[in-house]
Image: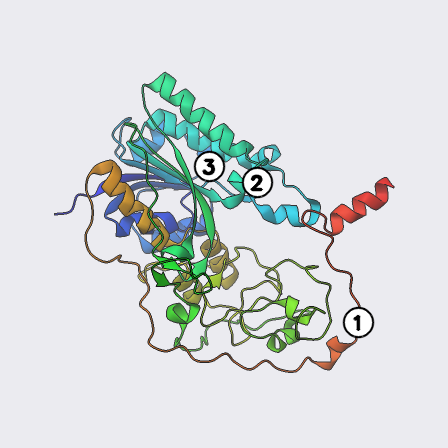
Amino acid sequence: MTKRFSVLSLFTGVGGLDYGFEAAQFQTRVALEWDHQCCESLRASRDWPLIEGDLLATPTKEILKTGRLREGSVDMLIGGPPCQPFSKSGWWKSGDSLRLDDPRSSTLGGYLRVLEEARPRAFLLENVEGLAFGGKDEGLKLLLAAVKRINETKDTNYQPVVVTLNAADYGVPQTRSRVFVIGARDGRVFVPPQPTHHDLNDPSRIGEPWVSSWDAIGGLREPKSEDLQLTGKWAALLPSIPEGLNYLWHTDRMGGAPLFGWRRRYWNFLLKLAKNRPAWTIQAQPGPATGPFHWNNRRLSGEELARLQTFPTNLHITGSRIEVQRQVGNAVPSLLAEVLARAIRDQFFDSPLEGPFLLQVKRKTQCPPPEPAAPVPLQYLRLAGTHIPHPGTGRGYLYETAELLDA
């Protein structure tokens, strides 16, 4: 019988990391999550011992007791502290984000407190790519310094490895880059798994081509139980954008009508999936015109979102469609978590798994051609003309406004 190693899960969310570790024969012995809707989804999907509460107000002893664990007995600590303080999205308009000045970054301290007091055999911390951006990596430096202090005071030998992985390189039908910090108590150094998939446009890569959106959600019946139609000012413009493109199609540098300035909007504005490529990152809190959208010019259904995140099929994610997308969009793709969990089993626990990945996406034999784009509706043609392009990274509208005020 395959040994099931224990997991203490913090910031569990809807369980993206946990489901990947579950597929690699780990067992979530206790999960902690403060968001009520996520907790409802976890209760509806699994019978894990669950603490619904704030980590900063929950003693480590209480967490260990709930999971029938004790200090030093936990095999694996996992979690992804809220990523907004380190997200690059905030830099687009103003050129910066709050990072450690953001109160939410104290969740990083909460994770480190549990690491110190539980002393697990190994840990994994997940965050957005911005955590490790050069010159803006205070959070990462804090984390590494804290781990060094824990080693000195707790007689541990964690040697954390920081690795940035694109989920699409490991068979996930979504391009989603995340940072993982991984270490073992006995000093073993984690070797990141080699990519297994590659972008067809990059001839230097080896392995299988990226898994496509069509592989993941193609052929599903059109959902009838959800209202997925676009609303708002730009809803009628989406059908005029070809598959795999966004609003940039309607600038003077591409083939549509010159309705916008080049890069004057964020990348996912009116962004549409291409059947033959992975999805772009699923957004947790999209606006009315924030994609990626389905090639049929509608929002993605809850089932489609879950499949693009490679969640197991036996889940029940509760709440409205907006709530479902928020929960799914904040999660780690479960297949990527399974890849890492298998590597950790092998390298840290000397217990490799054989056979195919449980959460891998089965390819479809044939991908249909793109849907034809529609003409631009008349109400948008009044916007056609000359538009000033974006002035450069970190110099968006708020930056320009501040410059004018300082002048």
Question: How far apart are labels 1 and 3 at the CA level?
Answer: 51 Å
Q: Is residue 55 left or right of residue 136?
A: left
Kindly identify the amino acid type of the residue bearing the numbered disc 2.
Pro
x and y percentages locating residue 109 in the rendered image: 48, 30
The residue where tag 3 is placed is: 54
Q: Residue furthest left?
A: 1
Indicate which label's residue lies in the foreground, 1 or 2: 1
Viewer-proximal residue, 78 or 159? Answer: 159
Question: How far apart are labels 1 and 2 at the CA level?
Answer: 38 Å
Kindly identify the amino acid type of the residue bearing the numbered disc 3.
Asp
Of mark 1 and mark 2, the one earlier in the sequence is: 2
Question: How far apart are labels 3 and 2 at the CA level?
Answer: 18 Å
Q: Name the element at disc 3.
A: loop
Of mark 1 and mark 3, the one earlier in the sequence is: 3
Establish if 259 lies above or below 98.
Answer: below
The residue where tag 1 is placed is: 385
Of mark 3 and mark 2, the one earlier in the sequence is: 3
Kindly identify the amino acid type of the residue bearing the numbered disc 1.
Gly
Would you say residue 186 is visible in this rendering? yes
Residue at image location 44% in from the left, 77% down from the top: 222
- Res. 85 mark: 2
Residue at image location 52% in from the left, 77% down from the top: 296
